[in-house]
Amino acid sequence: MNVKEAISARRAVRTYTGEKVDEATVRSLLRAAVQAPSAMNRQPWLFSIIQDASQLARYSERAKAMVLDQMAGDPKTAHYQEMLKSPTFDIFYRAGTLVVIGSSERGPYTDADCWLAAENLMLAACEAGLGSCCIGFAISLLNTPEAKAELGLPPAGIAVAPIIVGYPTAEPSPPVPRSEPKIVSWSGSRAAG
Ligand SMILES: Cc1cc2nc3c(=O)[nH]c(=O)nc-3n(C[C@H](O)[C@H](O)[C@H](O)COP(=O)(O)O)c2cc1C
């Protein structure tokens, strides 16, 4: 799989067998993650790996309550509120592994650095035949003092990019359509392609 193939093949996977990704594979995904560019080459990322099913279930329940509170009264999120209210909805889709990419402190580029690492990780997972998905619903919960302590992050640290990884139960769903790039300016004379 070349880079363009991996970019096109990666999809948000939301059904998993629950089987954990083995340690060697997790480490190879992290090696791909740290090849990402970072501002001033600070490489600020720290990784927390969660493969404890009961911890993931506990985080899911608490995150659902937090996100529901944040969404309360917003009709634009009605569909998500319904989903989050369901007792059977697991924000981690029963994936066996959650990788949280965070940092010991927040700098102006920390979020960008961590999300770039996250994309590398997801592309490497795709190449390895694994599914992955960003879980934004988990971010508030993962930044509570209790969760940060469990993740091994210092009190001033931040959890930026929660990514689930695991073995998909089904063929990937068809690509979510993308709009054509909206070019709003292009100065200078264009080179013929
Ligand atoms: C920052 C971020 C947060 C996301 N949070 C969630 C989430 O909490 N739950 C979820 O199922 N998908 C989440 N997604 C996945 C998007 O819904 C998905 O990437 C998008 O619909 C496009 O689909 P594709 O990744 O299959 O191309 C998130 C994606 C990003 C980039």
Image (cartoon, grey):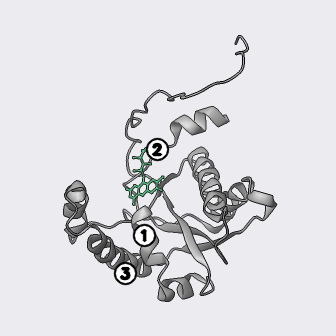
Q: Calculate the distance from the C-alpha at mark 1 to the C-alpha at mark 3.
A: 11 Å
Name the N-terminal-most of marks 1 and 2. 2
| Picture mark count | 3
Which amino acid type corresponds to the residue marked 2 in the rendered image? Arg
Residue 58's spot in the image, x, y percent?
A: 37, 81
Q: Does the numbered disc 1 mark a residue whose Cβ is under 8 Å from ligand 1?
A: yes
- Residue at 43 percent across and 62 percent down: it is 136
- Residue at 61 percent across and 82 percent down: it is 153
Instruction: Let me know if residue 1 appears in the view.
Output: no
Which amino acid type corresponds to the residue marked 3 in the rendered image? Arg
Q: Secondary structure at mark 2?
A: loop
Q: Calculate the distance from the C-alpha at mark 1 to the C-alpha at mark 2.
A: 19 Å
Instruction: Let me know if residue 79 appears in the view.
Output: yes
Which amino acid type corresponds to the residue marked 1 in the rendered image? Ala
Question: Mark 1 highlights which residue?
Answer: 138
Q: Calculate the distance from the C-alpha at mark 2 to the C-alpha at mark 3.
A: 26 Å
Which quarter of the rendering shows the C terminus? top right
Above or below, 37 relative to 49? above
Q: In the drawing, what numbered circle is on residue 11?
A: 2
Q: Secondary structure at mark 3?
A: helix
- Residue at 65 percent across and 65 percent down: it is 110
Q: Does the numbered disc 2 mark a residue whose Cβ is under 8 Å from ligand 1?
A: yes
Question: Mark 3 highlights which residue?
Answer: 58
Name the N-terminal-most of marks 2 and 3. 2
Q: In the drawing, what numbered circle is on residue 152?
A: none
Residue 154's spot in the image, x, y percent?
A: 63, 86
Name the N-terminal-most of marks 1 and 3. 3
Residue 74's spot in the image, x, y percent?
A: 22, 62
Residue 104 shown left or right of residue 166 in the figure: right
- Residue at 66 percent across and 36 percent down: it is 3
